[in-house]
Image (spheres, grey):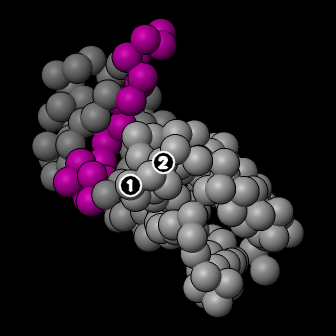
Amino acid sequence: MLVIAPDGVQVGVLELKKAIIVAEELGLDLVEVSPESKPPVARLMDYGKYKYELSQKAKESRKNQVKISVKEVQLKPKIDTNDYNIKLNQSRKFLRDGDKVKFTMRFRGREAEHPEFGQRILDKLKDELSEVAEVESTSRPDGRSLTMVLAPNGGRK
């Protein structure tokens, strides 16, 4: 078995028992790195410290990860112009912050008989937000509601 020292220098080819004795003398662990190679490669290291460093690297990479959340905006087909503009501006802010926006058009009572009214409002939203968003999933009926998901364009503004 080829043994490598903690600083990366090759100790040489040693028998398993002798490599374990060397590791114990140095107060280190003998870790098999590449068992398939000829001869197998083992490294002298502090395994606890190695696992700790790996967990710290994983924790750091998770910290730098961007989390995208989905914000939901609920609408009704008989929405007033001012309410519509407020929801439009709020969803534009969500999209600029990098969040996805799910629009849910809810129908009450006989409103469900004319889903084209709700579809027109969703299409209008899609057109007005086209500079900051792209459609991820088109509007589809979902019981007594229509849903549409918009995702932010590639670059943040």
Task: Indicate the position of residue 12 as horizontal and vertical percent values.
Answer: 43, 28
Residue that badge 1 annotates: 109
Name the outermost residue toward the right.
131
Task: Indicate the position of residue 30 as horizontal and vertical percent values.
Answer: 24, 36
Relative to the observer, which residue lies in front, 75 or 88? Answer: 75
Residue that badge 2 annotates: 112
- At x 49%, y 54%, the residue is 111
Q: Quadrant of the N terminus?
A: top left
Mark 1: amino acid: Gly
Mark 2: amino acid: Ala
Task: Indicate the position of residue 87 as horizontal and vertical percent values.
Answer: 59, 80
Q: Residues within 10 Å of mark 2 (few under 14, many from 20)?
A: some
Callout 1–callout 2 Cβ contact below 8 Å? yes
Q: Quadrant of the C terminus?
A: bottom right
Against 133, residue 37 (above or below) is: above
Name the outermost residue toward the front.
110
Against 130, residue 13 (above or below) is: above
Q: Can residue 34 be found in the magenta stretch?
A: yes
The magenta region covers: 33-53
SS category of the residue bearing label 2: helix
- At x 58%, y 47%, the residue is 114
Against 156, residue 9 (above or below) is: above
SS category of the residue bearing label 1: helix
Task: Tell me if I can see residue 70 in this picture.
Answer: no
